[in-house]
Image (cartoon, helix red, strand yellow):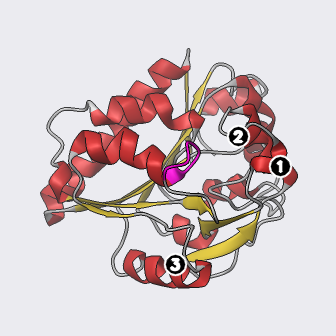
Amino acid sequence: MTIRVFSDKAALGREAAAHAARLIRRAVSDRGEARILVAAGGSQLEFLDALVRSPDLAWPKVEMFHLDEYIGLAADHPASFRKYLLDRLIRKTGIVRFHLLDGESDPAETCERAGRLLAAAPVDVAFAGIGENGHIAFNDPPADLETAAPYLVVTLDEACRRQQVGEGWFPSLADVPERAITISVRQLLKARAIVSVVPEARKAPAVVRCLEGPVSPDAPASILRTHPDATLYLDAESASLLSPQTIRLGFL
């Protein structure tokens, strides 16, 4: 894993978007199309805003999947990841091939259908964050690091649900759904490249646990350290608890 630290989340977002755009352009140049996996959430706002403004991206040649979605949440709810991606990426770029997870239909059927489409060909780049509890996508600790299923149904832990309230997506913990559909850890790791965008001080404890502790189901995002082409983008706040040696080396 490569670690890059920037002064603030705006600079982080610009550099991560430039990296993501290069990977998309390369895939389109090499194969005539790019397949991407996209995360939603407050931590991805600056990154996605910069990405949609990147020049010379052939968005009609991009096929998009996303990481996760709440079960039972309407598509027009302010916290819906479908709404988030439609508003912040799909409608702004003209992506015509996109596969949004339907959290209102039968979860098992949604997992099977989306998983079959996703597994049909390699993903060129996955965008992911790290949760306050160390989760990646909605794989909360202790996460299943072994299942081969592309998507699965999970029960969200309280720390994850409290994060959603803290970010302003829901008015109270009782309003946050308890279950979600998420991409599996193993499926995410199949992406050729991973760009992980993790700003803000509230993420610092999870960042240090995932980078300087053992690779473990108890710190699910620690698994990114095993990927051959993963880059973690941090700002000064999210990197604030890392040892000087980790930051100086810039890779794990």
Query: Disc 2 on helix, strand or loop?
Result: loop
Tag shown at residue 174: 1
Disc on the earlier residue, 3 or 1: 3
Which amino acid type is shown beneath numbered disc 3? Thr
Disc on the earlier residue, 3 or 2: 3
Tag shown at residue 110: 3
Residue placed most toward the observer, 227 or 102: 102
Residue at 51 percent across and 37 percent down: it is 44
Q: Does the image show residue 127?
A: no
The stretch of residues the image draws in magenta is 76-81
Q: Is residue 153 left or right of residue 230?
A: right
Residue 148, image x, y percentages: 60, 82
Q: Kindly report the distance in space between the C-alpha atoms of the residues bearing marks 3 and 2.
A: 24 Å
Q: Give the labeled residue for mark 2.
A: 170
Residue 79, image x, y percentages: 59, 45
Q: Is residue 56 left or right of residue 209?
A: left
Residue placed most toward the observer, 140 or 237: 140
- Would residue 119 be counted in the magenta stretch? no
Q: Kindly report the distance in space between the C-alpha atoms of the residues bearing marks 3 and 1.
A: 25 Å
